[in-house]
Amino acid sequence: MTTSSPPPLLRGINALIPSSQIAAATPGERAAIQLLHLRTAAVPVPVLAAALELIAPQLDDPDPATRDAAADVHARLAADVEDATRPQR
């Protein structure tokens, strides 16, 4: 009986995720783990604007920790969108 190994891309991506967390991680958690080491990323302004829209409902969450985190993320995204759309001199 032979077993096939995962494609090289999957081996690389899965290598970034500690094996004990793979089974229980949601797709979002896996993405966060994979991107944790990044310090900066270039993202198109429409993606930032969409993220602003997606995080906005969390600003009214009943949990204070969620509200605080959402407010921090929302403020940073809004500042990034503003900086990106400001005319260059």
Image (cartoon, helix red, strand yellow):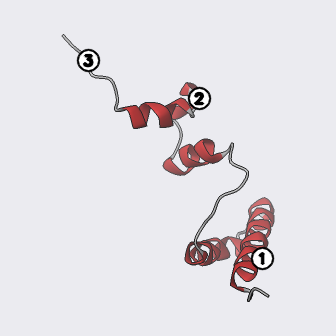
Q: Position of residue 83 (x, y in %)?
A: 76, 79
Q: In which quadrant is the N terminus drawn?
A: top left
Residue 7 sits in which quadrant? Answer: top left
Q: Position of residue 25 (x, y in %)?
A: 53, 40
Separation of marks 1 and 3 at Cα, in angstroms: 50 Å
Separation of marks 2 and 3 at Cα, in angstroms: 22 Å
- Amino acid marked by disc 3: Thr
Q: Which residue is mark 2?
A: 18
Q: Which mark is residue 23?
A: none
Residue 61 sits in which quadrant? Answer: bottom right
Q: Residue at x 70, y 79 (%)?
A: 84
Q: Does residue 23 appear in the picture of this structure? A: no
- Amino acid marked by disc 2: Pro
Q: Which residue is mark 1?
A: 79
Above or below residue 8? Residue 54 is below
Q: Secondary structure at mark 1?
A: helix
Q: Which residue is mark 3?
A: 3
Q: Secondary structure at mark 2?
A: loop
**Which comes sooner in the sequence, label 2 or label 3?**
3
Q: Position of residue 80 (x, y in %)?
A: 73, 74
